């Protein structure tokens, strides 16, 4: 089986937020070492999916305001407690060498990524502290701008990165913390690539050349990845993957605008989509469409610059056949049917992301 030869190193999983939202972080109420039915992720299904390394997102919503830093620390605390609770299944990974050691031990290497620059409250000291606690990437924005960077889903204010935003990128490079450009405006992507001396990542974004969604990566940015050394980790979010789902979602957003709702509010967006689906069922994305994005990134950026970032537990439903973290083999089977080589699958599944992590350590 290809997933056994090529363990998945996934860029983004939102189980920590689901554990907060549904269970108050109570692992007794919802233990994740058994198959569950209220999340898309647990340790049983991760093993079935061939996942060998996982970036756990320590996400908090933008609307928490002054609580954002404390709430992010609570997310970090949960991930560390989850790892400590299941030491035979999970291993904290801070370096590429740690990932390789965990893989050799048969444990899932567990890394953390902060999703949104609001989590540092415009403080380099907070950024450094989060790195010291184990956070190994930060997405520069979430759905809303931060004072120093524009988001893809907000109205532009600074035109990309401000001077302080460039300082954030430089400090992340110095620390060996990956700059994540998912969620940011294309102008922010280009500014960050111009500043960064280390490889960047897109932890969960797909290709704009296949589906013209603002959250996807334009071809000119993909074409810059070989010079930078970074990786675009293709996501499975249906609206980013399928043109039909994107068009349906645009109707949801239009209805939100008519109701005076904030399209940047991910929870309000989710609720609006559920209301709209009662009248107009959503189209269904497919494994083949995900594979189309993977192949486009390979064609534009090169095989050394494509990876996977599912965004499980950050979106529902997922494409048909990829409903939870046990389903990565379906994508690998699709790519095998498209004549992907063993070496290319190795690069996609873990090799490229492991290389970027290692290169970020060298650059620091």
Image: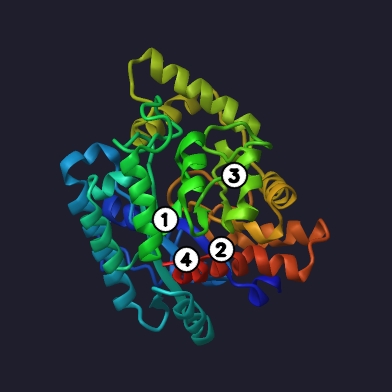
- Between marks 2 and 3, how big is the CA–CA gap? 20 Å
Query: Residue at position x 30%, y 77% from top?
Result: 85
Q: Name the residue under label 2.
A: 326
What x and y, as percent, mark residue 292? 72, 46
Q: Which of marks 4 and 2 is in front?
A: 4
Identify the secondary structure beneath mark 1: loop
The residue closer to the viewer here, 287 or 91, is 91
Per the image, label 2 sits on a secondary structure element best described as helix
User: Where residue 303 is drawn, which disc sits there?
Assistant: none
Q: How far apart are marks 1 and 2 (CA)?
A: 12 Å
- What residue is shown with label 3? 206
If you read the primary sequence from the N terminus, does the residue marked by circle 4 or circle 2 appear first?
Answer: 2
Secondary structure of the residue carrying tag 4 is: helix
- Whether the residues at callouts 1 and 2 have beta carbons within 8 Å, the answer is no
Where is residue 268, by image quadrant?
Answer: top left
Q: Position of residue 52 (x, y in %)?
A: 53, 73
**Residue 35 location in percent, x, y?**
45, 67
- Position of residue 312 in the picture relative to residue 266 (left or right): right
How far separated are the C-alphas under marks 1 and 3?
23 Å
Give the label on residue 39, or none. 1
Between 275 and 171, which is closer to the camera in this rendering?
A: 171
| Whether label 3 touches label 4, CB < 8 Å | no
Dot 1, how many residues are within 10 Å of its Cα: few (below 14), some (14-19), or many (20+)?
many
Q: Dot 4, how many residues are within 10 Å of its Cα: few (below 14), some (14-19), or many (20+)?
A: many
């Amino acid at each position: 089986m290809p997933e056994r030869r090529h363990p998945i190193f996934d860029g983004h999983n939102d189980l920590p937020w689901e554990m907060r939202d549904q269970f108050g972080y109570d692992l007794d109420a919802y233990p994740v070492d058994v198959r569950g039915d209220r999340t898309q992720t647990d340790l049983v299904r991760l093993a079935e999916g061939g996942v060998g390394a996982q970036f756990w997102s320590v996400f908090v919503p933008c609307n928490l305001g002054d609580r954002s830093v404390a709430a992010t620390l609570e997310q970090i605390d949960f991930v560390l407690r989850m790892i400590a609770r299941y030491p035979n299944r999970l291993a904290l990974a801070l370096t590429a060498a740690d990932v390789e050691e965990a893989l050799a031990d048969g444990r899932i290497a567990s890394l953390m990524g902060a999703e949104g620059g609001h989590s540092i409250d415009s403080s380099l000291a907070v950024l450094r502290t989060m790195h010291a606690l184990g956070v190994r990437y930060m997405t520069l924005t979430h759905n809303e701008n931060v004072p120093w960077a524009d988001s893809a889903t907000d109205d532009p204010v600074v035109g990309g990165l401000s001077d302080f935003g460039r300082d954030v990128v430089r400090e992340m490079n110095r620390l060996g913390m990956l700059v994540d450009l998912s969620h940011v405006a294309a102008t922010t992507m280009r500014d960050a690539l111009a500043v960064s001396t280390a490889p960047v990542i897109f932890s969960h974004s797909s290709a704009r050349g296949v589906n013209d969604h603002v959250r996807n990566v334009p071809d000119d940015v993909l074409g810059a990845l070989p010079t930078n050394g970074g990786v675009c980790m293709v996501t499975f979010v249906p609206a980013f993957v399928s043109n039909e789902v994107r068009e349906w979602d645009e109707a949801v957003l239009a209805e939100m605008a008519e109701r005076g709702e904030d399209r940047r509010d991910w929870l309000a967006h989710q609720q609006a989509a559920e209301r709209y689906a009662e009248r107009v069922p959503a189209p269904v994305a497919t494994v083949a469409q995900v594979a189309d994005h993977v192949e486009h990134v390979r064609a534009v950026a090169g095989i050394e610059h494509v990876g996977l970032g599912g965004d499980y537990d950050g979106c529902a439903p997922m494409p048909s056949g990829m409903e939870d973290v046990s389903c990565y083999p379906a994508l690998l089977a699709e790519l095998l049917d498209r004549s992907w080589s063993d070496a290319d699958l190795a690069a996609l599944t873990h090799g490229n992301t492991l290389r970027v992590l290692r290169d970020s350590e060298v650059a620091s």
